Structure formats: C-alpha cells, structure tokens
C-alpha cells in the first residue's frame, strides 16, 4: 500500500493502525536523559515529606514541579 492509499483509508475513517509497527513507535523529544543534581539536606527532606504526602516518589515530585515551572514560560 502506498502513502496515498493509506491517507485515503484514514480520511475515510478506516482503522489504519494495522499498517504500522507500533513496537518501534517513539515520541520525539520525550526520550529520557539522566541529569545529576545536588540538593542540600533540608531540601531533600522537604521533597521527601511532599512525596510522602502525595503518595509518589521524590523523583516524581521534582519532575512535576519542574514541568509546572517550565509550562509557565
């Protein structure tokens, strides 16, 4: 099947997922990259308290807060 035929199927509302290999699917810009950051002890303790309050891991708190801050800009 060529791209034009696939486009036509999609435009007609047909399910075209069968034509794709979803095992190799990647979302650009969402690859993870390890970053090392040093925090003072009081900050780690505050992060741990917040993580416990929310029922999530410390790393998740850091990711959420940074993402929120970046979304502002």
Image (spheres, helix red, strand yellow):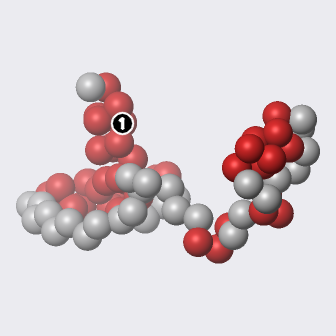
Check the image and report above or below for 60 versus 8: below
From the viewer's perspective, tell me whether residue 35 is left or right of residue 33. left
**Furthest residue to the top?**
73
- The image quarter in which residue 40 lies: bottom left
Residue 36 shows in this picture:
yes
Q: Does residue 19 appear to the left or right of 39 in the view shown?
A: right
Quarter of the figure with the C terminus: top left
Depth check, front residue: 71 or 46: 71
Quadrant (top left/top right/bottom left/bottom right) for the N terminus: bottom right
Question: Is residue 10 something one can see in this rendering?
Answer: no
Residue drawn at x 16%, y 68% as measured from the top left: 36
From the viewer's perspective, is residue 11 above or below residue 73?
Answer: below
Q: How many marks?
A: 1
- Where residue 11 appears, as percent x and y from the top left, is 82, 34
User: How far from the left and from the top, in percent, is residue 4?
Assistant: 74, 44
Residue at position x 24%, y 61% in the image: 45
**Residue at image coords 82%, 53%:** 16
- For residue 52, which quarter of the picture? bottom left
Mark 1 lies on residue: 68
* In-front residue for pair 27/52: 27
> Residue drawn 72% across and 63% down?
20
Binning the other alpha carbons within 10 Å of mark 1 as few (below 14), some (14 to 19) or many (20 upward) gives few
Closer-to-camera residue (11/31): 11
Q: Residue furthest bottom?
A: 23
In terms of secondary structure, where does tag 1 sit?
helix
Residue 25 lies left or right of residue 66; in this view the side is right
Examine the rendered structure and indicate whether residue 23 appears above or below residue 30: below
**Depth check, front residue: 24 or 1:** 1
Q: Quick check: 5 above or below 73?
A: below
Residue 28 x, y percent position in the rendering:
43, 54
């Amino acid at each position: 099947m060529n791209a034009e035929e696939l486009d036509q199927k999609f435009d007609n509302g047909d399910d075209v997922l069968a034509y794709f290999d979803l095992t190799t699917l990647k979302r650009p810009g969402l690859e993870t990259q390890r970053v090392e950051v040093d925090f003072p002890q009081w900050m780690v303790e505050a992060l741990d308290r917040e993580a416990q309050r929310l029922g999530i891991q410390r790393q998740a708190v850091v990711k959420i807060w940074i993402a929120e801050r970046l979304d502002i800009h």
